[in-house]
Image (cartoon, grey):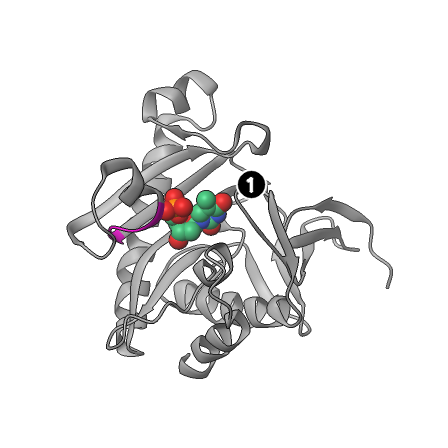
């Protein structure tokens, strides 16, 4: 079946399918950082992220979080519900790292007493700027009820994933979520993978995520395989 390409992002392609209510996502091997300024192709990354995302979406569905996920159909392809993406990136942090560490001038690794939720405007031309709920209202990205739902879903995802990863010896430091409007309301969309999460080994602190690429540490595929091996 040849599918019509609907959209190509930095790490994925989205195709239309014969079913108007379903899209096919293809996970690419491209890795980017700093809003696409740094780019590389890392053979095998797409396959690993599709696998990891599929396992996580299945886990979240089992725990009552509604997602766009339908099923994994091949090594690189995931069938999902058609959604219109909300132009918001929702970041949840359990431990200080990355841009928060820079913004607050606090060393990476400090555990937060409660999860911290941040909002960014999903807009590549602007570099996904940090925004507040008032900006969400001014930009009319989602209504108040929708934003409340998104926030509570994001915190629920954190509770489920934090415990799940801890069981596997992994500290879920932070992650980014995206949501979409489906015909049944707002659902969790996009992907959840080491591209979109910070995952640190509980015992060694070893980074098992895309910071290995962002920070030129090498060993990205080995790290993602390490995660897959623990799922
Ligand atoms: P940050 O510390 O760079 O703001 O990143 C916070 C989390 O969000 C981290 O787990 C990586 C993830 N993230 C994305 O998924 N996409 C992005 O474009 C950025 C900047 C971060």
Query: Where in the figure is residue 192, as x and y percent of width and height?
Result: 47, 59
Query: Where in the figure is residue 22, as x and y percent of width and height?
Result: 68, 53
Residue at the image position 52 percent from the left and 45 percent from the top: 184
Magenta residues, as a range?
94-98
Determine whether the beta carbon of the residue marked 1 sits less than 8 angstroms from the nearest atom of ligand 1.
yes
**Residue 137 falls in image quadrant:** top left
* Residue 156 in the figure: left or right of residue 18: left
- Residue reaching furthest to the bottom: 229
Label 1, residues with CA under 10 Å away: few <14, some 14-19, many ≥20: some
Residue denoted by label 1:
35
Query: Where in the figure is residue 55, as x and y percent of width and height?
Result: 48, 72
Residue at the image position 32 percent from the left and 67 percent from the top: 200
- Residue reaching furthest to the left: 113
- Residue reaching furthest to the front: 216
* Residue 130 in the figure: left or right of residue 224: left
Secondary structure beneath dot 1 equals loop
Residue at the image position 37 percent from the left and 67 percent from the top: 207
Q: Up-down: is 203 above or below 113?
A: below
């Amino acid at each position: 079946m040849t599918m019509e390409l609907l959209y190509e992002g930095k790490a994925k392609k989205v195709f239309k399918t014969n079913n108007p209510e379903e899209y096919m996502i293809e996970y690419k091997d491209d890795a980017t950082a700093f809003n696409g300024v740094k780019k590389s192709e890392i053979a095998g990354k797409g396959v690993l992220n599709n696998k990891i995302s599929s396992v996580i979406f299945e886990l979240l569905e089992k725990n009552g979080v509604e997602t766009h996920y339908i099923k994994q159909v091949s090594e690189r392809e995931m069938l999902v519900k058609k959604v219109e993406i909300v132009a918001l990136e929702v970041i949840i942090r359990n431990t200080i790292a990355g841009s928060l560490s820079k913004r607050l001038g606090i060393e990476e690794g400090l555990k937060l007493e409660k999860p911290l939720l941040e909002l960014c405007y999903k807009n590549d031309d602007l570099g996904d700027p940090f925004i507040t709920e008032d900006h969400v209202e001014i930009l009319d990205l989602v209504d108040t009820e929708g934003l409340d739902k998104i926030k509570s879903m994001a915190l629920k995802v954190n509770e489920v994933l934090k415990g799940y990863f801890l069981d596997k010896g992994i500290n879920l430091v932070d992650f980014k979520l995206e949501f979409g409007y489906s015909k049944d309301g707002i659902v969790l969309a996009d992907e959840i993978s080491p591209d979109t999460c910070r995952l640190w080994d509980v015992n060694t602190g070893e980074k098992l995520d895309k910071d290995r690429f962002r920070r030129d540490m090498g060993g990205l595929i080995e790290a993602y395989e390490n995660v897959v091996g623990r799922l």
